[in-house]
Amino acid sequence: MSHFSLILSKFVAMLVLLYIILNVIFGVNFMNVVWVTLILSIASYLIGDLVILPRTNNIVASVVDFVMSFGLVYFLVDAFAFDSNLFTASLLSAIGVTLFEAFFHSSVQTQIEEENNVNPGRYNLQTEVSEEIDPLIDDEDRDNK
């Protein structure tokens, strides 16, 4: 899968998740949810999946995604003049995004391993055999030939 398809699948899954949490539960406008999802999915893919995940493991990348998603959702939803319980909305969104990211990281790690796996091809090489190095023939048999 290419980077575009990974970002697109992440965006769609996060949009569904954040729509349920932010729009249905907390009443955030749908277009605001789309903007938050777009910014969060691109930022978490670039920072969490391409920079941190290859250098660490799934747990560290998920913790970074939790902190990043909490902070981004908190400040972006606050910027869109959200009047309800901002901390709870951000916390539930960050928990949901982190649970999704834990599964998403396995597909990203598989993608990175496939890109780094280089198949050198087959080398059809043979060893050279001659009379001088044939261990089954004695010196006397060689002289007689």
Image: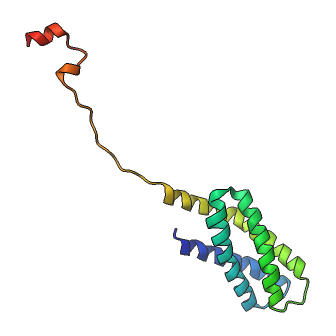
Q: Is residue 13 above or below residue 128?
A: below
What residue lies at 70% left-to-right and 87% top-to-bottom?
A: 35
Front residue of 74/21: it is 74
Measuring from the top left, give residue 60's x and y in whole percent: 73, 59
Measuring from the top left, give residue 119's x and y in whole percent: 41, 52
What residue lies at 11% left-to-right and 10% top-to-bottom?
A: 143
Rendered image coloring scheme: rainbow
Measuring from the top left, give residue 61's x and y in whole percent: 71, 62
What residue lies at 27% left-to-right and 35% top-to-bottom?
A: 126
Q: Residue furthest left?
A: 145
Taking the image as shown, residue 78 lies to the left or right of residue 59, namely: right
Q: Residue furthest right?
A: 85
**Quarter residue 103 falls in:** bottom right
**Quarter residue 36 falls in:** bottom right
Front residue of 53/97: it is 53
Numbered disc total: 0
Q: Is residue 9 above or below residue 84?
A: above
**Quarter residue 16 falls in:** bottom right
> Is residue 73 at all visible to an observer of this figure?
yes
Q: Quadrant of the C terminus?
A: top left
Q: Is residue 74 above or below residue 54?
A: below
What residue lies at 70% left-to-right and 58% top-to-bottom?
A: 58
Taking the image as shown, residue 116 lies to the left or right of residue 51, namely: left
> Is residue 106 at all visible to an observer of this figure?
no
